[in-house]
Image (tube, rainbow, N blue to C red):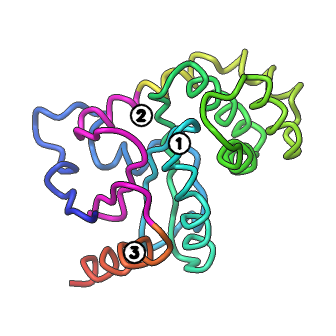
Amino acid sequence: MILTAGAALAAGPAAADDLSREMIVGDPAAPVGGAPRGDVTLVAFLDYNCPYCKTSAPALKTVVREDGRVRLVYKDWPILGRNSVYGAKLALAAHRQGRYETAHAALMALKGASRPTTDLDEAVAAAGVDMDRLRRDAARDEAAIVALLKRNDAQAKGMGFPGTPIYLVGPLLVAEAPDVERFKAAVARARARQKG
């Protein structure tokens, strides 16, 4: 399902700062992948326990890599329980050592939902993230990580998102678990709208 999200992204006078388009696509604390100066920004609201997020993760990675001009903003939105929050905090702590996408890929690759936290730790460690540093960074930056998760939650709820995954592709909202072709179509439509 592809919808126009323009009205929802327009920051009216009553909109909170966290709900402005600039904050959603440009929050300096949010991890960014793909082309940092890409011509289309894709914002992904995801949960590591969401089976649909895991299903669409390979397609998202493929489109961002093959296109080469998509800026990907990750919005960890852990809404499916404590293990979701734990996974999001792991990934965001890994971001402190430049390993967010490594941790993200490892967590998305885990089969099933609500895995024990030890499984999450093991997956991130096996992917090559320095776990001693991650723990230090997580403890030191706990308040900043929690604040980012709260902003992501406020943005998703403020936009009326029903759950994960949700993708904002330029001004378009893509729900459900898109495949490569649906992602490509959304990117093409977003580019066309920017030109016209």
Q: Is residue 63 left or right of residue 95?
A: left
What amino acid type is highlighted by mark number 3?
A: Val
Q: Earlier in the sequence, mark 2 or mark 3?
A: 2
Residue at (53, 76) in percent of width and height: 69
Tag 3, which secondary structure?
helix
* Between 60 and 92, the one nearer to me in the picture: 60
Q: Earlier in the sequence, mark 3 or mark 1?
A: 1
Disc 3 marks which residue?
187
What amino acid type is highlighted by mark number 2?
A: Asn
Work out which quarter of the rendered image holds the N terminus and state it: bottom left
Q: Is residue 195 left or right of residue 143?
A: left
Q: Earlier in the sequence, mark 1 or mark 2?
A: 1
What amino acid type is highlighted by mark number 1?
A: Ala
The x and y percentages for residue 26 are 43, 49
Q: Which residues are magenta?
A: 151-178
Q: Are marks 1 and 2 in contact (CB under 8 Å)?
A: yes
Residue at (58, 68) in percent of width and height: 35
Q: Does residue 194 lie above or below 101 as drawn?
A: below
Residue at (69, 40) in percent of width and height: 95
Work out which quarter of the rendered image holds the C terminus and state it: bottom left
Whole-angstrom CA distance, mark 1 to mark 2, is 9 Å
Tag 2, which secondary structure?
helix
Q: Nearer the viewer, mark 1 or mark 2?
A: 2
Whole-angstrom CA distance, mark 2 to mark 3, is 22 Å
Q: Are marks 3 and 1 in contact (CB under 8 Å)?
A: no
Q: Which image quadrant for residue 19?
A: top left
Residue 12's disc number: none
Disc 2 marks which residue?
152
Disc 1 marks which residue?
30
